[in-house]
Amino acid sequence: MLCSHTYLIKCTFIPEQSNKMSDPSRLSEQEIERVSIEFHNNGFVCIENFLTADEVDRLRREANRLIKEEAVNERDKNIFANAINAKNDYFINSGDKVRFFFEAKAFENNELIVPEEQSVAKIGHALHNLNPTFKEVTYSKKMSDVFNAIEFDEPTVMQSMVIFKNPRVGGAYTPHQDASFLCTEPIRLAGIWLALDDATEENGCLQFIPGSHNWPLSRRFVRVEKDNGQIELEWTAPPLECDEDKFVPIPVKRGSLVLIHGLVVHRSSANLSNKARWIYTFHAFDRSRAVYLKDNWLQVG
Ligand code: FE2
């Protein structure tokens, strides 16, 4: 375990030296070089077999346990469709908690109409600090190699989620840049996306516009304090409009890691298949060269 602090601002990776060439728990020198080149050229890169089958199983078991033992107690608080609501305190104050957001389509007249294990849309946003199983993967030596590859000297995790994209009810993520949600000055932000299922075009794999990490940030999702002292969330500009034919789908196998530049435009479609698409994702910025902005929607501590 590389990090024992609870609060994100103190929680950083500690690079370690070792013979990476022969160590399966590290990235090889060739892999680090490939990651660096593709990340800078395209704004994203896939690393197959990043997680072992055992690691994937451990994360899946823990996510299942959270749904069965903890989500059930939160069901009446909100559903995901209403969660990104400007006045939803459960969502706004989830930065340092493990909270549950439900599939809007899993309910009809407040009654659950899908199996319980398919009812949760996502868990967020502090699994990386508060849950030992997710913390271990987040701060592994192999993960620190990924951040070394993109020259993040002090990668600092500010947010994590399990996203389930359940069969038939899992919704789409429209085109966006992650820095819209988690902006730093200057922008030194990367997302880690770990497939806990095979991600296909049918169940909603990631789709990217290669090279769009060179585009400017289109808009931000920020906290605004109103006259009555209430914190509300607002967009600073209308949504991105992109040509459909520019998106390239990136299907990946279970256990793969996709590294995402904070500015690259990406999306994923709804899951209309009968197969789930579970992922664990988190974001880090390089605290040695950038500052996390105080008006980002998500704040911790
Ligand atoms: Fe994203």
Image (cartoon, rainbow, N blue to C red):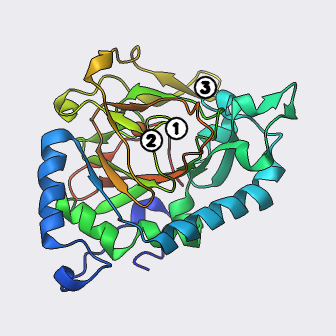
Provide residue 103's location: percent of width, then percent of height. 69, 35
The residue where tag 2 is placed is: 200
For label 2, the crowd category at 10 Å Cα-Cα, with few meaning under 14, some 14 to 19 and many 20 or more, is some
Residue at mark 2 to residue at mark 1: CA–CA distance: 5 Å
Residue type for callout 1 = Asn
Q: Earlier in the sequence, mark 2 or mark 3?
A: 3
Dots 3, 1 in contact, CB < 8 A: no
Q: Which residue is mark 1?
A: 203
Which amino acid type is shown beneath numbered disc 2? Thr
The C terminus lies in quadrant: bottom right
The secondary structure type at the circle numbered 2 is loop
Residue picked out by circle 3: 86
Is 36 rendered above or below residue 189? Answer: below
Q: Quadrant of residue 3?
A: bottom left
Q: Is residue 294 left or right of residue 149?
A: right
Mark 3 neighbour density, 10 Å: few (under 14) some (14–19) many (20 or more): some
Task: Give the distance between the C-alpha atoms of the residues marked 2 and 3, in whole angstroms.
Answer: 32 Å
- The disc placed on residue 183 is none
Look at the picture and state if 163 lies above or below 12.
Answer: above
